[in-house]
Image (spheres, helix red, strand yellow):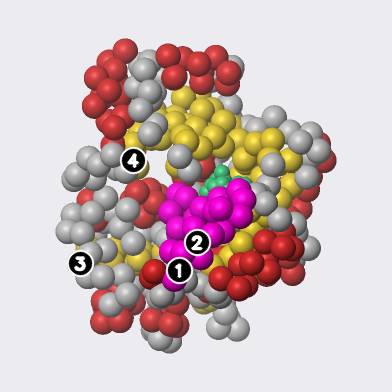
Amino acid sequence: MPSLSEETDGAVTMLEPGSTIGIVGGGQLGRMMALSARYHGFKVGVLDPTPNCPTAQVADFQITAEYDSKEAIRELAERSNVITYEFENVDADALDEVRDIVAVPQGTDLLRVTQDRVNEKRFINQHGTATAPWKEINGVEDLVAAIDDIGYPAVLKTRSGGYDGHGQRVLHNADDLAEIREQVNTEGFMPPSILEGFVDFAFEASILISGNGHDFVTFPIVRNEHRNNILHLTLAPATLSHEVERDAKALALRLAQGFELSGTLAIELFITKDDQVIVNELAPRPHNSGHYTIEACSIDQFDAHIRGIAGWPLPQPKLLSPAVMVNVLGQHVLPTRALIADHPEWCLHDYGKAEIKHNRKMGHITVLTSDLATTVNDIEATGCWSDLS
Ligand code: AMP
C-alpha cells in the first residue's frame, strides 16, 4: 500500500497520492474533505453509523458502525494510512490506541481541548488570548458564586456535547437562577458546565487557520450571522479595522502554534463595538463559515485540511472575490430547488442527506459578488429563507 514517504532520518514527511485517508464522521464536512482528498489522488474510507451517509457517497469504503466503537476505529486504522475527523466528539482514547498502526496528524490533544469548554477556555487564555470571563460549574452552589462574580446576563453551557446553541441558556436575573435550581432539584443532577459572561458583541466573525505541523496559513476573516444559534449567512470578507484584523490573525497563529496544528482549525470570534477580539470557541476541523472558500479562495479550507494532514506545503490562501454563503436548512430545500433555474449565480451544494428535517443542514449556496449588501438583500428577497424558526 502506498504510504508516507520518509526522509533519510526516518521522519515522516509527505503522504503520497494513492494512500488512504480514513475519516471519522460521515456528514457534510467529511464529504467535502473526501471530495478534496479524491482529486489529490487519495483514497477515502469513512466511519459512520448511517449507511450511505453523505461522505460514503463519495468515498471508497464505509465502515458502518458507531463513532466510538473501538473495533470499528481499529478497522479504519488498519485500512488507512492517516486518520482525520470531521467533528470534535470523537473518542480520543480510542484514537490514541491505534496511533501505533496509523498516523493521526491532528493528534488527540486538539480533541481533548476542543471537546470540553473548560479545557478550551483555559487553553485559549494560556495562549494570551481573551475569552468572555468564565467559571467552571459543578453544581448549583458553584453557579451562585459564579453569578456573584460575573453578574447578569450570563450564559450557562454544558462543558461538552453542545452545538448550535444546544445545551446552553442565557440567565438574565435571579428568577432564571431559581428556575435552574428547581430543575436541578427535580432531576437530582447538573451536568458539568461553564458559566460565561454575556459578550455584548457588535458582530460575530471567524477565522480559519491551516497547518502542516510547522507552517501555518490564515484565511480571510469573515462575518457570520446566526438565526436561532444556527449559522445563516457568512459574508466574506468581514469589514474590519486594521487592528482587529491584525489581532485576529495573531491570535490564530498563537493557537495554531500551541496545537502544532495539522489540518484546519476554525476560530469563532466576537468583535466588540470598541474593536476587542474575543474568542468564543474553536472547531478542530473545517467549519461551516469556511464553505465560501470553495469558490471564493485560491485554496479552500478542505484542500488546506487535506494537504495539512498529508504533510504537504500550504500556499497562502487569497480571496479571489467577495462572497456570501447562505445555509440551506431542511425547510429551505424545496423553495431553493424551485428557484435553481432562475439563479445561475448560485453555487449550490447539496449534501446528499436522505431525510429532509427542519433546521437540519442540507446544503449551502455561495454567491460571488462585488456588492455584499445587495447580494444579501437579493438572497433574502427570494423568500426562500423566510422560515428561520
Ligand atoms: P456556541 O455554541 O458557544 O457557539 O454559541 C452559539 C451562539 O450563542 C453564538 O454564536 C453566539 O451568538 C451566542 N453566544 C454564545 N456564547 C455567548 C456569550 N458568552 N455571549 C454572547 N453570546 C453568546
Identify the residue position indicated by label 3 in the image. Answer: 64
In the rendered image, which residue does mark 1 sit on? Answer: 184
- The residue carrying mark 4 is 359
User: Percent position (x, y) of residue 199?
Assistant: 68, 47
Does 220 sit above or below residue 261? above
Which amino acid does the dot numbered 3 rest on?
Answer: Thr
Residue shown at 48% from the left, 43% from the top: 229
**Marks 3,4: beta carbons within 8 A:** no
Q: Earlier in the sequence, mark 3 or mark 4?
A: 3
- Marks 3 and 2, how far apart in space? 39 Å
Residue displayed at 75% across by 57% down: 130
Q: Nearer the viewer, mark 2 or mark 4?
A: 2
The mark nearer the N terminus, 1 or 3, is: 3
Alpha carbon of mark 4 to alpha carbon of mark 1: how far?
Answer: 29 Å
Q: Which residues are magenta?
A: 162-185
Q: Amino acid at mark 1?
A: Val
